[in-house]
């Protein structure tokens, strides 16, 4: 089981969502925490970046990296599709 760690900006983004959206985000993150390499989630690796991934939850994108030696998933950016990659 991996630990999840969030940058302050990601926590603010999640807290600013509606309760229904927060619940969907929490459920998806729980699935990701148990196995970050499962295929039933909408996950893609970022081109040109080693060990960095994009998780899609509805209209939102979460960028994260997996740190194997610490068994950690670090979320460093979250936003809507148009703004997350800037």
Image (cartoon, rainbow, N blue to C red):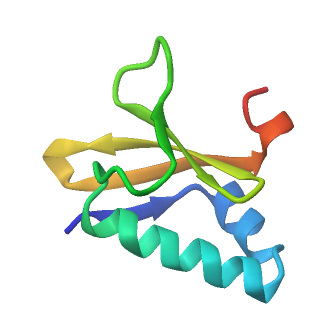
- Image quadrant in which you'd find residue 20: bottom right
Q: Is residue 9 left or right of residue 31?
A: right
The residue shown at (20%, 55%) is 71
x, y (%) of residue 8? Answer: 65, 60
Q: Is residue 11 left or right of residue 47?
A: right
Q: Is residue 86 above or below residue 62?
A: above
The residue shown at (62%, 77%) is 24
Farthest-out residue, left:
69
The quadrant of the image that shows the C terminus is: top right
Q: Is residue 8 above or below residue 23?
A: above
x, y (%) of residue 85? Answer: 73, 29
x, y (%) of residue 59? Answer: 78, 54
The quadrant of the image that shows the N terminus is: bottom left
The residue shown at (78%, 40%) is 81
Farthest-out residue, bottom:
19
Q: How many numbered marks have been drawn onto this rendered protein structure?
A: 0
Farthest-out residue, top:
48
Q: Is residue 22 above or below residue 51?
A: below
């Amino acid at each position: 089981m991996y630990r999840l760690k969030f940058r302050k900006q990601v926590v603010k983004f999640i807290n600013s969502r509606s309760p229904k959206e927060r619940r969907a985000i929490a459920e998806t993150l729980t699935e990701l925490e148990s196995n970050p390499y499962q295929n039933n989630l909408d996950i893609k690796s970022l081109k040109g970046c080693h060990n960095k991934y994009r998780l899609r939850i509805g209209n939102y994108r979460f960028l994260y990296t997996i740190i194997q030696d610490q068994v950690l998933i670090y979320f460093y950016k979250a936003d809507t599709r148009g703004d997350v990659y800037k």
